[in-house]
Every structure is written in C-alpha cells, then in structure tokens.
Image: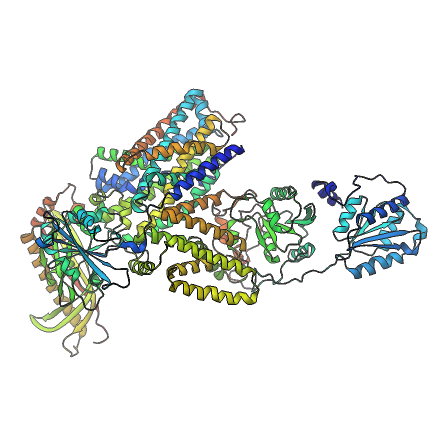
Amino acid sequence: MSYTITSKQLLFTLISSMLGVGILSLPRVTAEAVGQDAWLAVILGGIIPFVSIWLSNKVVSRHPGLSFAAITEMLAGKWAGKLLSAAFVIYSIIASAAILRVFTEVITMFLLPRTPILVKIMLGLAVSAYMTSSGIKVLGRLNEFLFYVLLPPLFLSIPAVVKFADLHYLMPVLNNSLTDYSKAAFTTGFAYSGFETIIVFAPYVLKKKETLKAAVMALIITITIYLYAVITTITVFGSELTQMFTWPALRLLSVSEIPVLERMEFVAIIAWIGVAIRPASNQYFCAGLIIKDVFGIKSLSKVVALLYPIIAAIAWYPKNISIAIRLSDFVGMYSLILGTALPLLLLGLSLIRGKGRARDEKNT
Amino acid sequence: MKKYRIALKAVKPMSTIKFRNKASDGEKNADSADFFDRTADRLRKDLSGNADVIIRELFIGGNENLDALIVYLIGNIDKKMLNDNVIKPLMTCSGLENIGLSGEGLKEHIAKKCLQTGSVKYQKDYKAALQDMFSGEGILLAKGIEGFIIFAVDGGQKRQISEPETEKRIRGTKEGFIEDIWVNIGMIREFIKDPMLKIEMLKIGQRSQTDVAIAYINGLADSKIVDEVKKRIKKINIDAILSSGYVEQYIEDNPWSVFPQLLGTEKPDKAAANLLEGKLLIIIDRTPYVFSAPTLFVEFFQATEDYYEKFHVGIISRIIRLIAFLIAVLGTSIYIALTSFHPELIPSELLISFARLRKKVPFPPVIEALIMEFIVEVLREAGIRLPTSVAGTLGIVGGIILGDAAIRSNLVSPAMIVVIAITTVCNFVLPNYSMTLSMRLLKFFLILLSATFGAYGIALGLIVIVTHLAKLESFSVPYLSPYAPFRLRDMKDALLRLPLWMYVKRPVSIPHIDDKRAVNNRKKSGTGEN
Amino acid sequence: MKKTHRYILLFLAIIINALFLSGCWDQRELDELVVPFIIGYDYANEEEKEQPDDRYLISAGFPVFYEDTLKKYHVDITSGSLDGEVINRRNTHFGEQIIQGQLQIVVLGEELISNENIMELTDILSRNPAVKGAIPMAVSAGRAADMLNAPVKQYPNPGIYIQMLIKNIRRTNFFPTCSLFESNRHIISNHTAPLLPYIVQKDGNIMFAGSCLLNEGKRIEHLDREETEIAVMLRGIRSRGMITFDVIEDNKIIDQVTFEGMNKRKVDVKKDGDRYIFNILIKLSGRLFERKKNEPVIDHKDFIKLSQKSLEDLIRKRAEDFVAKVQEEYGFDALELGMEIKGHSREKLSKEDIDKIIQESEINVEVKVQIENAGGKI
C-alpha cells in the first residue's frame, strides 16, 4: 500500500464518520422510544456496531494488504465481488448525500434561511470534495486535527446548562418493556451509522495489530459523547419536552445565559459545521476509493469529480425536511444491515476459502 | 577542484555565451610556447571590451624568458594583496634556474614557492579559467606551463556586519548575515564548531554562477532529505539567481500555495538553531537571507527571543501570537458576517449602537471593508518606498486626519475603522515576514466568502484552509506537524514554550538520526543548585 | 491533458460565477431592521380591531435607529386573529424587516392569560429557532399594551425597565422568574403549574406585585406578596431576599428583625400504600439585617437562636396555610412536586393523576433557618 494512516488516525476517522448529524436528533429519538431511559438506549444502540466492527476487523486481518474491493473480488469471485462492492458504494453515496442534506437543513434553519438549498449543498459538497480528493493520508490528518480543535467547545457548554439540570428527569430507571428497549436499540443504531466504513479504512493502517483496539476505542468515545448529549438534554428538558423539539441538542444551548456570547447556539452551529462535514467526506471517500479500486482508475480526483453531481442530485432530491429525515433513517437502517451482513458474509467465505495474503498482485 | 567540474557539468554547456567566438571543447595542446602566445592573444581578444579587466604582463623571477600574464578584475580583488602577495613575490622569485623553463616542475615551483596566496589551483580548460577570473579570482598564464594557475585574492567592498532591519533582538546576537557567502558560512561555523557540520557548494545560474551552499550536520540530518534538497537545487536551470527568493520558488513543494514553505532568517543564531534540530540550511551568495528546510507551519509562530527569556514569557507570547493570527485573518470577515447576515448574534446594546452608526453610511459593510482594506494596503505599499522623513508625516496624515475625516463625512463607520485597525496591527505580530503576506491573502479570501454566505462561508473557508495546510508537505514532512499527525512530544515546543531543561530530545516532526539533545540535570539534582 | 484541464477550469469558473454573482440572498442591512425587544399580548378591544374577526393585540417595543426622530423608542400595536397574522400585518407598518431573534421580554395581559393557554400563545416564539429559550415572561395587571406605553421616570423606556426588573429580582427578593422554556418544561414534562411574576404600573413606576399560577397554561389567581414568597420557598426557586418578622419568646413579642438570606428546599418522597407522603424541608440561610430595639442583649447567642425559631415558626405556619390552600382550593400541583412524583412511580402518570395525588397526599413542611452572622454591630 502506498498510502497509510496511523491507528490513531483510524480512531478519529471512525469517530468522525459516526458523529455527524445523528447527535442533534438523538435525544428526541431515544426519548420517543423509551422516555427517561434514553441514556440506556444509547448504550444499547452501540451493541450492533460493536459486533460489526469486530467482524470487519476479523475479515481485514485475515487478508492484510488487500483493499476492500480486492477482498470481495478474491473471496466471492470477480462479478459477485464487484456486486458486493457496488452495494457498499451505493450505500456510501446515499449516506453522504443524506448527511449533507440534514446538515444543510440545520444550516438553513439557523444561519441562512433564504439562500437556495442547491447553492448550499453545492458549496458544502465542493468543500467535501476538496477534502476527499486529497487522499487518505490528508483525510486522516484532518479528522484527527479537527476533532481536537472542535471538541473543547462541546465541553465548555456544560457549566452554562448545569444549573438547570435535574436528575429526577432520569428516574425511574428501567420502566419500559423489553420490546421497547430492543426497538430503541435498533433506532439508536442509526445514529452510529458510519461504523461500517472501518472495512474500507482498516487495510491502510500502518500497524495492523492496533486496528481492533482503535476501532473499539472509537466506538466507546462516540458512545460517551452521545451519552453526554442525551443526558444533558434530558436532565434539562425532561423526556416529554425533548420530544417536542426537532433538534433538542441545539435548543439546549439557547437556554443558557452567558454574558459575552449571548447566543451560544450559533457559535455551536458554526463549530458543528466542521463536525458534520467530516462524515460526508469520509463516506464520499469510501465511495470514491472503492470505485477507483474496482475500475482501476489512476486518479482519485477524477472519480471524485464524477461522483459530485450524483451526490448533489440525491441530496437535493428531498422536498422538505420530513422526507430528508426519512432518507436519513433509511440510510441508518441500510448501514445496520450492511454493517452486519457484509462482514459476516465475507468472514464466512474467508473461513471457507482460507486465508489469503496479498503479495505483489494487488499493489495499488 | 573536482567538485567544481562536476557542478559545472550539471549546468548547460556554456557554448551559447557570446564572447566565445572560437568555442571548441578540449583544445589539444601544441607546443607550450605556442600555447602561451596563442592563449595570450585569445585572452586579449576575448576580453577587449571590458574596461575592468586588467591584463598585467610580467617576467617571473626577473627572467626575460619567462613571460607571464596576470588577468584579474580590478573591482573584485584586494589590490594590496595582489601587489604584495602575488606580483612582488613572482617578480622576485628565485631558484628558477635549477628547474628549467617548462613543464610540471615550473608549475610546482611557481605555485608552491612563488605565489604567496592562500589558495592555488591548476586549470587546463580555457573557459573554466576565464569563468574563475570573472568570479573574482586571478589567473596566471606563464610561458612553459600548459594551463592556468588560479589564485584567490578576494577583496572588493563589502557591507559591514550590522543588525538587520526586520529581525531585531534584545537579548541575542545583533549580527546579521551579509551578502558574502563565505562570511555567512563563517558566522555559522562560529556558532556550531562541530566538525560534523558539512557545507556543500553548488553553482547555480548560467550567467550568474551564484554560489549556493547547503549546510547540515552530518549524523543529525536525515540523508534522504539532504539528497532531495540537493537534487532539486541542481535541477534549477535559469539565467541568474538574483536572490534567494528565486531558489525558494524553484524548490518549494507547492508553488501554488499561499503559505511559505521555507523559513528564511537573517540571524545566525536562528540558523544555527535550525541546524541543530536536524534541518538543512540553504545559503545563497549575494543575499543575506538564509533558508532552512524542511519547514513546519508552527515555526512561523516561534521567535528566538522566546527561548532567551524566561519560559513564562514564551508561553504567553505564543498564545498571544496565535490569537492575533486568528484575529488578523478572521476579524473583518466576522464583522461583515455579523452585521450583514446574523444580527441575532450581536449583543443587544451593541446592536443598537452599530445600527445607529450604520444608518448614516451609504455603503454595505462589504464595500466599506474593501475600501478600507484597499486604503490600508495602499498606505503600506507607499510607506515602503517613501524616504523616512516623509513617511512620518504621511503616517499622521493618512492615519489620523484621513480616518477622522472619513468618519465625519460618513464614508465609513467608526466600528469598521476599529476592526480594520485591529486586524492590521495583529497582522504584524508574527515574527516572520513571509507569513504576514499569506495572512493578507487569506483575509481577502475569507472576506469574499463571508460577504456572500455569512458565517457558513467563513466556516467553509476555514475548513478549506485547514485542508490545504494538511495537504501541504515540505520535503515529505507534513506541514501541519506536530498538530496534524499529532505528536505529543513536540507539543512542549509547538503549543507552549516549556522550560529549556525539559527539551531533552529533538522534535519528532523533523526527521533526524540522533535523538538526544541534552541531559536534564535538574531532574537528578533536584532544584538547580549549582 | 491540457485541453481537459481547460474545460474543467471553464466549468469551475462558470459555477463559481453563478454562485457568487447571483446574489447574496440572506444579506440584510443592519439599519434596515426592526428589532423588537419586548412584546405584549392582549385581547383586542372593539375599536382596536382592524378586521372584525381579530382577536389578539400584540404590542412590540423597539428602539429607533434614525437620529432625528421624536422618540428613541417606539411601540407598535397591531391586531390579528392569530399571532402569525399579527406579524404579517405589522410588516405593513414598516419599511424594514422585523427580526425576532433579539426579543428580551414577553409580557402577557392578565385578562388574556386567564382564558387562553400560554403554550398556544407563545408557540410562534418556541418555533422560531432564533428566539432564545431563556426569555423571561411576566403577567401584567391590566393590559400589556398600557404597560409598554407607560411613562416611566428614571429609565429611557419601559422595555428596559421591565428587563432590568426581571433580571435582578431573584437576587433581591423572594420572587420568581419564569422563562419560556421553563414554563414549557413545567407544563409538559412536570405537569406542574408555572409561577409567573405579576407586574403593575403605578405613578411612573413599574413594580412587582406578586405572582400568578397558571393551571393548564391559564391563569388562576394572583398571589400577593406574602403568598408569593412562601410559594417561592416551597417550590425551591433559589432566590435571595429579606423577611421582616417579630421575634417571639414565650408568646411575647420582644423585638422585630429583618433577615436577609437565600432559600433552598429538599423534598423527601415516601409511599405509604397508595398514599404519598411528602416532607418538604425549607432551608434558609443568611444574616441578620436589622434589629429594631437598640439595647444589647446580655447573651446574644440566644437571641439569634430565638430569631431563628421565630422565623421558622412563622414560615411554617404560612407554608402550611398555603399547602392547605393548594390541596383544597386549587387542586393542582402548585408546589413543583410533579417531577418528584414522576421520578418515583413506575406507572405513567397523566396530569389528572398528579392532581389527584396532590390532593390526597400528606404534605408536611419543615423549616430550618440558619442565621450565620449579625453584621458589624452586636
């Protein structure tokens, strides 16, 4: 492999892929499902991604040096492998478009109400394309750097809202039926969508042994951040009121009164632009990389340019916000299915066919 | 001498230069006396138009059979040294009768017993010898010797070592580099007396034949980077190198980027510090600016004064510089975005006063900002070229009276003037001048974005800038280290300036071979008792 | 290769031009805005209605940006059948755009709030993401429009006056403030009645005259000063204020004292079969502010204990009266016990359930006063 990323960069790339637009509506979704036990739902939702990460890592470690497209072709034969890769590519394209669209909706609501949606989408996608066409090394560095830069504002909002928080809103615990919890775990799993990209990024890690540890760490950190968001929202608003707001996490920031920056939430939105554009870029990159590998195209920028109008069109397609949210849910479900079924299938084939190591044949 | 020849071969052959009418490589020599006459005629003919070339005929040792010619440039040599150490001993040279009048013996005798200069070379090639003469050395052509003897009588008027204008020190050395490359190299050697410090010379530029030196500490600098730098410099194929800026633009990784990729300095202590971290120095004749490669983004925020004072000052200075950088780049665009797109973000009392002031101004904030920026840029450009006496008065006129009158005539609002003034002042906080130019370009980029898309535009613009920085590599070292591939060990220097005794190892971000830099004696012996 | 590069650049240039030159859609001039700082809701009288089926009258107070106008602060009154229609009509009064993001106070007319649900009235504010959730709300005696137009003496306009009042009241008196999101939270999540401050206007002064309880978003009654203070202490709204009381020893009044301090509450919930038992502990801590009698007491430590006990008795009595009133007269949760109940029970409770529980349960009040110091004089 000519390009590599460190395991720490894999960690941050995974976190960035998962932590995107889901965090804003997560308190509402979990409160609707299980009320005050939303935090439990968040933890339960992490089970399926955890299994998927473990499976993906297993598959990748059995075939070191092979990219995702190469693994599928090797295990499932030429055409079936290409079909599997195509399934992943379609998912990545739709996911990138859905993330971009929801992100644009939030921007529309808060910052730029009158600019046409297409213009905002094209701008955001252009920046995303620039990030993507720089290659995996730069993407890894960016994910890491932006994570460090944008994380402190998240924690600085704590003192402002903690005086309104009341732990009674989290009680009583475990008040719902088992079906409620499993349904909640399933819907919360949508918020973690992005974990399946590990199967594309993992082959490029420099030190192979640390991949699993990094991926699990990434999942744990994401769960922690989600827990933080959900718990602060519910302790301040109460589970019923949380269900009333479209994006409760943002409404939370408008509750506090800070002397200088009167409106914390706008500053948070501006910082959040940097947070939300990363999963769009990561998914865009996965799609571009797989297409590049499958068709053997030399330059990544050409593929990126080719995908640009496709993703822009899909992102522009929903006519209003409820369709956009439904698109996002569809992506979430697709991610859960793809994230478990695909590695399982590949692992099964790999166990049957035996380990294959990449030597000189697949040299990208 | 051997290195000379190899370097010359890398450059295009000089057969196109005009004064070589009878250009032919490798003259096969005829008789020696023939050689002398022929060459002397040829010299006189080739150098006929030059008034500053002196051809001095003399007899070596007073022997009328030993005709000799000395050719030199009158403006570039030390006349006293020429008279005392070359002409006088040559004319009074003794012991020639025993040797004979030709051949190697004569050459050896003249070179080793008669010429009293510091360096003596033999050169057979006519063109090369002529080139040496034009480079400031003297050539001796004697009957009986096939070839030239070249001796160094360097002189000419040089600038005194003085403090450079742009980098002033309170506590460090006040010397700065001058134009002569040998003096500069000498200054560096005075800081690092290590025999492992290697200086390699190249000559770049067809017509200028400028000396370019690459300095590095052998066993410290990464050999791959040394090879890469040398390769790139050798590839330069240009008429003349008039300044180090030319070299920089040819060997940078990404010439399209607005960020400088080589760190220039005029001070020997900073140059020496860079060498000690494992970097290379590129020193160019005729320019007091010395470059170091590879370069990181954080280095433009570091000043050597930070290291000479107590570390508390260093930490605060770094933080102030970072904040000032952000203000200078973002200040105007945030103001435009707030007043044009997001009035809800402004605190309410400020909103009322801003709105009242803006009521009187006819232009939208963008136009105001661009007008003000233009005026500031014009003042700056004009200020560079003004003589100092006029500059002071013009500063007062431009700054105070013009600004005041502009406010009163309601051409610009006072808030805008405050914003522009603060951003302009913050622009010059960085210790390195090249970065301030990049900051101005970034500022304009962000202003345009914020004028069309408000805060969304600023956020996207920042992301584009960060992506660009992450993509940039200086000689295959990532430009944003130690931030982008996060290196915790380097944070001691990159983010803050921790005490010197904590810098035990060299920074990871710059590839190097030997890791240990110092030993932390404070840890062993408790607090510094000495 | 060169040709493709050229085409790509051309394409990019067209795109960029199209983006940037087609206009900045969202740009608005700062001075061409109308920024209301204070809003008042009322019923519309017959003569104020522009159309026959108008219902509401919304007054907005905002600063004027032009320099040579008569007034620096202007109140605009518009009527409409729904809030949105009012805003629509109001836009025809101005040449400028109205932005709601800088709203600071909402004042509700007393008559209006007795008949309409506050959630419906302020829906437009909750829905607009630019409006901050921490806007304080107040109920005005009489009409809100009169309050906004009141001639005030020492402040530039009533908007600023009310804003300063509400901002500071919790630091100087045991009075409540309630913000938009807090009222939403009380009604939806807690099934409790929010407590809104009540302001009147008299002789060029605007002042607090008590508070109002809103059951199901509608005003029930206004509580006077004493009851407001007790309600604040019972509900646990943290504030700092002063109480003047008589020091009683052996049923004899020996002195009068002013106490200044902060309040806190702690609620203990127990279930006895089907019945709930609440133990509310009110903690007051502060200092002795003033004493009427000027003679030094021989053992002043006892005096402080005596004052503490007198105050405790006084507050407890008032609190128990108020609790009885809540349970018998009101019948809904006025004590912010809703969230404790919901946190405690495993069933999903609706508002009626909580009302019933409040009526039937046993509520005990305990008061503890701690006077930490007595100032510089003995």
In the rendered image of this protein, does residue B513 appear above or below residue A350?
below
Report the side of A34 relative to B367 (left or right): left
Q: Quadrant of the C terminus of chain C?
A: bottom left
Residue B455 image point, x, y percent: 36, 48
Report the side of A289 relative to A220 (left or right): right
Q: How many marks?
A: 0
Residue C66 image point, x, y percent: 28, 60
Report the side of B82 relative to C143 (left or right): right
Residue C303 lies in quadrant: bottom left
In this figure, which colouring scheme has been used for the structure?
rainbow
Q: Is residue B50 visible?
A: yes
Report the side of C23 relative to C181 (left or right): right
- Nearer to us in this view, B2 or C5: C5
Q: Please, which residue is most extreme toward the bottom here?
A: C295
Which residue is at a point 44% across and 28% down the rendered structure image? A291
In the rendered image of this protein, does residue C17 appear above or below residue C336?
above
- Nearer to us in this view, C285 or A161: A161
- Nearer to us in this view, B461 or B382: B382
Residue C9 image point, x, y percent: 48, 37
Q: Is residue A53 visible?
A: no
Q: Please, which residue is most extreme toward the right here?
A: B97
Residue A71 image point, x, y percent: 45, 26
